[in-house]
Image (tube, grey):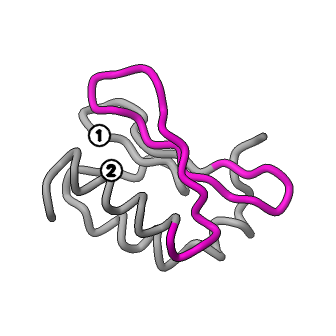
Amino acid sequence: MHEARPDTLRKLEPLIDELRRRPQLEEKAPGAFYAESRLFLRFMEDGEACYADLRWPHGHEFDRFEVGSDVGRRQLLSALDSRFGKH
């Protein structure tokens, strides 16, 4: 597993655009979003599979979402809404 490459991030552009519209998040590097000055969301890949790792606001662990499917992307956005409230 490694950080998502630029070509993988381009495939996720609609999702990443949605994340960019969320005022709680700041994209400090392509596909790396911060909240409260801490890495909060990052994209990883393993072979053909792509994942978003989402950190709990004050925690150290990440929850992993498979974002190669619409279901996984909806789950990620729902988890964001539950952590920050609807945007």
* Mark 1 crowdedness (10 Å alpha carbons): few <14, some 14-19, many ≥20: some
Q: Is residue 56 above or below residue 13?
A: above
Q: Residue shown at 22%/45% (left/top)?
A: 83
Q: Position of residue 80 (x, y in %)?
A: 30, 53
Q: Is residue 26 above or below residue 15?
A: above
Give the left or right position of residue 2, taking residue 20 as reference: right
69 vs 29, nearest the viewer: 69
Q: Residue furthest top?
A: 60
Q: Position of residue 41 (x, y in %)?
A: 45, 45
* Mark 2 crowdedness (10 Å alpha carbons): few <14, some 14-19, many ≥20: many
Magenta stretch encompasses residue 52: yes
Magenta stretch encompasses residue 53: yes
Which amino acid, by three-letter code, is at mark 1? Ala
Which amino acid, by three-letter code, is at mark 2? Glu
Q: Is residue 62 above or below residue 73?
A: above
Q: Secondary structure at mark 1?
A: strand
Q: Position of residue 6 (x, y in %)?
A: 70, 63
Image quarter hosting the N terminus: top right
Q: Which residue is mark 1?
A: 35
Image quarter hosting the C terminus: bottom left
Q: Residue shown at 62%/53% (left/top)?
A: 51
Q: Residue shown at 50%/48% (left/top)?
A: 32
Q: Residue furthest front?
A: 71
Give the left or right position of residue 75, taking residue 49 as reference: left
Pointer 2 and pointer 1: residues touching (CB < 8 Å)? yes
Magenta residues span: 44-71
Q: Which residue is mark 2?
A: 26
Q: Secondary structure at mark 2?
A: strand
